[in-house]
Amino acid sequence: MTRRGFPGLFILAALSCLMAGGLCAQSRMLACESRGAPCTQMNIVWSFNGTQGTATPGGTLSIERFDAESLVVRRADSSGLTAVYTGAVHGTRIEGTVEWTWPGHDGYPASGKFAAILQDAPGATPSAPTAATDGTNALPEELLVCENNGPCNAAWILHGNEGMGTWFARNPVHAKLTVVRAEPDNLLIRRTDTTDGVTASYAGSLRGDHYSGVIVLDGTNQPGATTGTWTATIPQTKCAGDMDAPSALATGQTALMFKRNQDALNCYTVAANDGDARAQTAVGLLYDQGSGGVEQDYRQAFYWLHKAADQGVYPAQRRIAEMYAAGLGTPRDATMAHIYTARADEQKHDYERQQDLNEREADRRAQVLSSFVLGASFGLFF
């Protein structure tokens, strides 16, 4: 048993390592900091080699004091932000206060709370994700990600400790993903957007059959403040024939996000046969595109898009007009092309307005086959 003031052999060994001036293997702490209530999610990795180290996310670290009773660490970021952490040692856990200084920024100096856990992780580095204790990789290759209790509209594809993520919206966002740590109870993934360079850290752990945790956005005016939450599950993309239409639509959307077009087609067909206009549009567009393992078939595309167009779906009306004009999947018919073009023009503003309303709905998770997914996948935006 470890008592305050009398750390066990592990703590003594770790202290000796840290204070030896970098002569032993790296040591690691998991830390968190907050201006408000005591933080509980350890979403920052402190890696030390002797008394010097780095914070991920964050900057450089320097241990000014570390003994059986207390810890003092100074942090300096490239932005000019500095922080001093002062805490009391309780076995493997450290709790205390943090003082931030940031010249030229409103609200500084500022103070808050921090906590850390000392881990026995010799040789661990942020660039090398570790395996689970049962010998299997704790992180699957594909994850369907939901953020801030909103829609599950992000597809993450990982290969080892690198990967890519796509957030499907009117303007899809792409980001590079780097797995810093991959253990069931300690997951940390860095995100760097490829468009504007915005970075964020996703920290979490495995809870049953899904991952959950917090998002810390870099560059905020409150260092260490939690800016969101996230959950992730292994994507399900297969549909059975007896699946109800809403479930088939939701599964089809997931399959489409992960570019499994044949699985998406199978799912959408289930709902399309049930009369759902959105599913009919998706089936028609998949046949029209003829990609991702789905063979192009203009007759099938025309059949399903016509059904959706007659139910007032704008993208279907627009494409049916083009197919009548070009004779794709149906004989050329200039008159019908003109009729469906006029219908589409009448509905264009209604379609745009409905998209805006959909994006403002309180429970976006209920929106299966959202229009922004169709638009991002098939280039329907104008």
Image (spheres, rainbow, N blue to C red):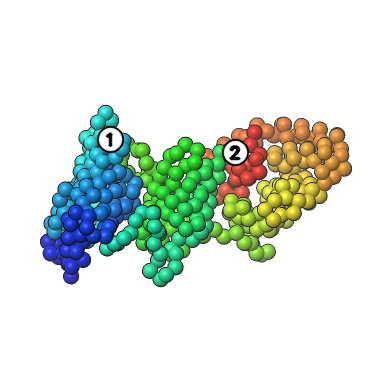
Q: Which residue is mark 1?
A: 80
Q: 223 or 60, which lies in front?
A: 60
Residue 16: x, y in percent? 17, 60
Query: Of the numbered discs in the image, which one, if any, rests on residue 355?
Result: 2
Residue 259: x, y in percent? 61, 52
Q: 310 or 289, which lies in front?
A: 289
Mark 1 and mark 2: span between their CA atoms? 43 Å
Q: SS of the residue at dot 2? A: helix
- Side of 96 where 123 appears, left or right: right
Residue 75 falls in image quadrant: top left
Which residue is depicted at the point 49% across and 41% down?
194
Mark closer to the chain start, 1 or 2: 1
Is residue 364 visible to the viewer in this orientation of the structure?
Answer: no
Query: Of the numbered discs in the image, which one, if any, rests on residue 136?
Result: none
Q: 57 or 356, which lies in front?
A: 57
Which residue is depicted at the point 56% across and 38% down?
171
- Of the two numbered discs 1 and 2 in the rendering, the one whose residue sits closer to the viewer: 1
Image quarter (top left, top right, bottom left or bottom right) of the N terminus: bottom left
Residue 117: x, y in percent? 25, 57
Is residue 65 visible to the viewer in this orientation of the structure?
Answer: yes
Q: SS of the residue at dot 1? A: loop
Q: Give the vertical position of 239 relative to 319 (above or below).
A: below
Task: Say what amino acid the circle numbered 2 marks.
Answer: Gln
Task: Say what amino acid the circle numbered 1 marks.
Answer: Gly
Which residue is depicted at the point 63% across and 42% down?
375
Image quarter (top left, top right, bottom left or bottom right) of the C terminus: top right
- Side of 355 where 85 appears, left or right: left
Residue 126 falls in image quadrant: bottom left
